[in-house]
Amino acid sequence: MPQKMSIQGWLTWLSLSLFSLLQFFLQVSGNMLVHPMMRTFHLNEAGLGAFNSSFFYGYVVVQILAGLLFDRYHLRRVCLIAITTLALGSLGFALSENLSLALVARFIMGAGSGFAFVGMVFSASEYFPTRQFAMMVGIGEFIAMAGTAAAQKFAPYLIMSQGWQLLMLICAATATVLFLMMLLCIHEPTPQPKTSTLWQELRNNVTEIIKIKSVWLSGLFCMASFGVITGFAALWGVPFLQNTHGFNYLQATSAMSLVLLGIAIGGPIIGWFGGKPARLQRGLRLTAIGLLLSTILVLVLPKMHMLLYPALFIMGVFGSSYVLSFSAVKLNTPLALRGTGIGLCNTIALLGALIFQPVGGAVMTALKHSHLSASHIDALALLILPIVMLLALIGNYFIHCKTPEFTQARESVETTTTQAA
């Protein structure tokens, strides 16, 4: 499909970036809800980790399907259904009176949210040239992270004064406003006749995409770097700062916004520098090393050390390197499989939440009655983050970063073949 840097393209990308902002806020809001959820639903740390990960189960389940649906039906109808699902899930969660209903509602929220980031990345792929792709994904993430960091400053006060239910009702109302924006801004292309059923296309696309090794390795890198969010910023970072550095609730949530601010600033810069094919592999390696070292630094710094705040910020800057994963996917997947490839990469990335959050909670619960202090227990539970980052760094050496000429030539052949058929 030709690149179209049109007003419609910009508005489509912007509406999906705002959708991504809302889903990301919901994704990391768990760090503000640790104690409210434990009190409301009578959960221990292990139960909280499992409860919070229910959002990510819904998110992960739809990832490959989301990519396929974008490949097949484009953006408009898929995103309208997704944002409606998110609004209903948020409303249901706000009104939940028992744990079972809350789990179902959070799963539905995750399923609706699962289309936001993939849709934003897909729109950047559709409407912007290859050399600008990673930068536009980075700017989209800047909107999501900066907006979430700002919300993290004010949402805790709302939760403390009015309760977490009102926050979820506001999220449902915001999703409704985004529905109207998408209805006005996203337009469908001329529909193409389909020669296969949705199930056949899903089976064929998945069969082809799982054969591409670089997609799997890019997903591992994405999981490791995004673990800064799913394993730290989204849940266990706030209790870690409270137990290790003596922060109160408001201080800890405020400090956590530095990680999000680092991701917001780092995303466009790293996307611009490392997103070009000639620099992509080097960008992947350097940012992996930076994230590994900064994560270890945050975990080992003594109480209230003067380096903590800059370390949290730097951790976020290098954590934004997950945007490079999608550049590698774009360069290594055929045009017809691009949405599916993006979905698979994001699926692998979000599997980190299903590992980091429950495992962290299980370790904390298991060691709760040991002779170790709370700060040492939290640090041990979070060691999984640098371990996975080290594995991703090793995997980086096997990711192939093809040139734009290769990708363009392949897409030209595919387009010609499709037209001839």
Image (tube, rainbow, N blue to C red):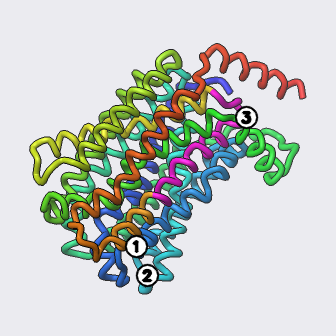
Between residue 377 and residue 127, name the one nearer to us: 377
The tag earlier along the polypeptide, 3 or 1, is 1
- Left or right, residue 69 beside residue 315: right
Name above or below for residue 412 compared with residue 392: above
**Residue linked to disc 2:** 96
Note whether residue 400 is visible. yes
Residue at position x 19%, y 54% in the image:
254
Locate residue 144 relative to residue 407 in the image: left or right. Answer: left
**Three-letter amino acid code of the residue under disc 3:** Ala
Place residue 313 in its image quadrant: top left
**Amino acid type at mark 2:** Ser
Disc 1 versus disc 2: nearer the observer: 1
Q: Residue, x 74% and y 19% (percent of image)?
A: 412
Residue 358 on the magenta segment: no
Q: Which residue is mark 1?
A: 46
Mark 3 surroundings within 10 Å by alpha-carbon count, few (fewer than 14), some (14 through 19), many (20 or more)? some
Q: Is residue 208 above or below residue 131?
A: below
